[in-house]
Amino acid sequence: MTVTTQQTRRPRPRPRTTGEAFARRSLPGLVAVGLTAALLLTGCGFQIRDRVCDSGHYPVKAVGNTTGADCAADGQEPPEGYVRYPAGQVPEYVDDEWDRYWSTVVVDETGRVVRG
């Protein structure tokens, strides 16, 4: 009985072209950069929002001008020259709906909107 060894045929290595080698190395990096750019441009990335006031404080509006605002400690009345925002209209984050609104109006000492 004669036993022969089976030879396996291995494919010959193909010489890589410069473009193919470049594509294999840089494709994952290009995909990562593309995804990052897409997230940043569409606004779907992580959004960091600054609160108007720190914990333990609430925002107050300055009387007589559009730009004045401050924070008062919880449980204390607003300082002189400031009033509380109306319930439901208190800005929580910088540049949120109510922060933008209150930066365009003037209030009197009772908190009512007046002409500025």
Image (cartoon, helix red, strand yellow):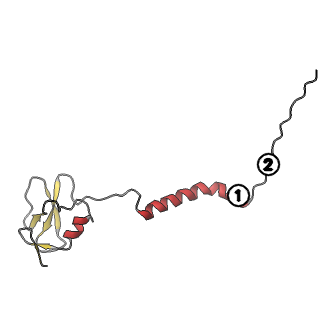
- Front position in the image: 22 or 88: 88
- Mark 1, other Cα within 10 Å: few <14 / some 14–19 / many ≥20: few
Q: Quadrant of residue 4?
A: top right
Q: Quadrant of residue 27?
A: bottom right
Q: Residue at x 17, y 52 (%)?
A: 56
Q: Residue at x 79, y 48 (%)?
A: 13
Q: Above or below — where is 66 with respect to 94?
A: below
- Front position in the image: 78 or 102: 102
What is the x, y in percent for residue 57? 16, 55
Q: Label 2: which residue?
A: 13
- Front position in the image: 46 or 76: 46
Q: Is residue 96 left or right of 39 when viewed as pictured?
A: left
What is the x, y in percent for residue 65? 14, 74
Q: Quadrant of residue 99?
A: bottom left
Q: Residue at x 18, y 61 (%)?
A: 90
Screen quadrant of the C terminus:
bottom left
Which amino acid type corresponds to the residue marked 2 in the rendered image? Pro
- Mark 1 and mark 2 lie on one chain; the one further toward the N terminus is 2
Screen quadrant of the N terminus:
top right
What is the x, y in percent for residue 113? 11, 72
Q: Label 1: which residue?
A: 20
